[in-house]
Amino acid sequence: MRVWKRWWCLGQWLASPEHPALSTRQAWLTAELFGLLPDTVRVAVDPGFFADNYLQLVPLAAQLGVLPVPTGSGRNAPPSNEDIARVAVGALLDPHRHDGRAYRPTGPTLLSGADIADAVGEALGRPHRNRSQCGRRRHHACADHRVGPGAEMTDNQIHTQYSTGLTQPSIRQALRAAGKDLEHLRPADLTLLEDFHTMGRFATTELVDLIRITADMRVLDAGSGIGGTARFVADRCRCRVTAVDLSDEYCQTNRWLNRLVGLDERISVRHADVTELPFADATFDVVFSQHVQMNVAAKTRLYRETRRVTVAGGRLAMWDITIGEPGELDYPLPWADQPGRSHLVTAGELRAVVESAGFAVEHWSDLTEQATTTMQLLLSMPANPLGLHAFVADFAQKAENLTRALGDGRLRVIRGIARAGARAIS
Ligand SMILES: C[S@@+](CC[C@H](N)C(=O)[O-])C[C@H]1O[C@@H](n2cnc3c(N)ncnc32)[C@H](O)[C@@H]1O
């Protein structure tokens, strides 16, 4: 055969006329068209899903801590661009051996999405998550089952639970490691590390969307942690927010971050106890309480105090963990390293104590399933330098214990919105 031209065609592993994807059918058609040309020889190189496709997602993984892979539960042996090129060069250097043939280059090993995520995590230099089950302390959830005054967490115990003495330097380091310029930080740069609750910013956004806050409203973030919700609300709703927390270290970090992102004029931070708020009656239109009551045994006092500082008709926005099925809990949990610091009740009890404090519940949903799936997905991804682990000690283990308990129903997560009735109950 007289050969005028040799074509080296880069196609697709799955290329066929029956494939459901148009682009894959087109890849098949293109290769066929070259094959129809007279005096022409075609060598087909049809790789599977390139390693490079995963590499395109690395910036996203570094930013969000999530590596979305399209292979589902399937496995793939991704070839590198270099290996694909080697096959092509081999065909070009020794054409007669390869004329009319087709090759399917693959990488050396079949990898699942989780394997790829681990490899990306290693390349990004993030510590591997320790999934060891050893050394966990176990405790029966029912032992947490208390309502009303009890062993309240003191200032000192809150300090022991949450403070590391390093919150600010750790966050500074994490921000720098993620390539953030601290002189020009924007609120969105903090998204991944500032929401200290289940489902992070996803949960905050959904709750804030439900509440509909306008710029003239006065908002309290009661038990604000390092201030994620306060900043999100102040930035997005352009309103004034007051943040209260019993951890002085968190309050200081909160003020520092507010300054860094230019929201310090809109947010004031007070070091105070949510069961004894330093505000006059009817000061706020909206009060956020997210993942705080789990540290508070005196729930009646907590919600009466919340009701007192809320205007009649104002709203309480809750995002909280409750007890579910009876069963032992594994510690540490994100809000308690040990059982004595955790004051959980059932969802029914929580709702009852909120109502008895003078609120009418308008929205109450159990989002345990959604939270479990989200948390499982987040935990399966390589850790991002900007996650809560940047400043929360042993965070991976805490999040894992929480997610497992949500998954099997020992814990539940509740979103609630309650409207303050006409009169505060003293
Ligand atoms: C799990 S963190 C949640 C922080 C924040 N609400 C968030 O969702 O990002 C719990 C926070 O509640 C605070 N806290 C616990 N008991 C408190 C109390 N009695 N008064 C004020 N803050 C309290 C802790 O200091 C901690 O910052």
Image: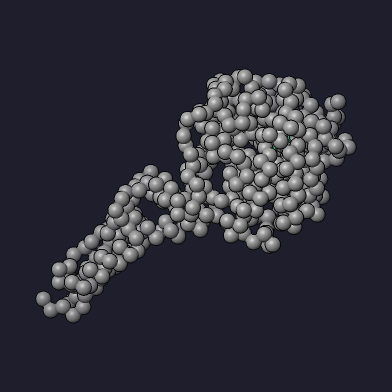
Residue name at image x 65 percent, y 20 percent: 145
Residue name at image x 79 percent, y 26 percent: 301
Vertical arrangement, residue 396 with respect to residue 39, above or below: above
- Image quadrant where one finds the N terminus: bottom left
Vertical arrangement, residue 70 with respect to residue 24, above or below: above
Question: With 422 as the anchor, is 349 left or right in this view?
Answer: left
User: Which percent across, then down, holds residue 233?
Assistant: 72, 48
Residue with the most extreme left position: 1
Question: With 76 as the anchor, is 286 left or right in this view?
Answer: right
User: Which percent across, then down, holds residue 99?
Assistant: 17, 69
Q: Nearer the viewer, residue 81 or 25?
A: 81
**Quarter of the view holding residue 334:** top right
* Residue 13 in view: no
Question: With 44 as the anchor, is 279 left or right in this view?
Answer: right
* Residue 12 in view: yes
User: Which percent across, then down, holds residue 313?
Assistant: 81, 37
Ligand 1: quadrant of the figure:
top right
Vertical arrangement, residue 125 with respect to residue 245, above or below: below
Residue name at image x 16 percent, y 78 percent: 3
Residue name at image x 18 percent, y 80 percent: 4
**Quarter of the view holding residue 18:** bottom left
Residue with the most extreme right position: 280
| Colour convention | one colour
Residue with the most extreme front position: 165
- Total labels drawn: 0
User: Which percent across, then down, holds residue 116?
Assistant: 40, 50
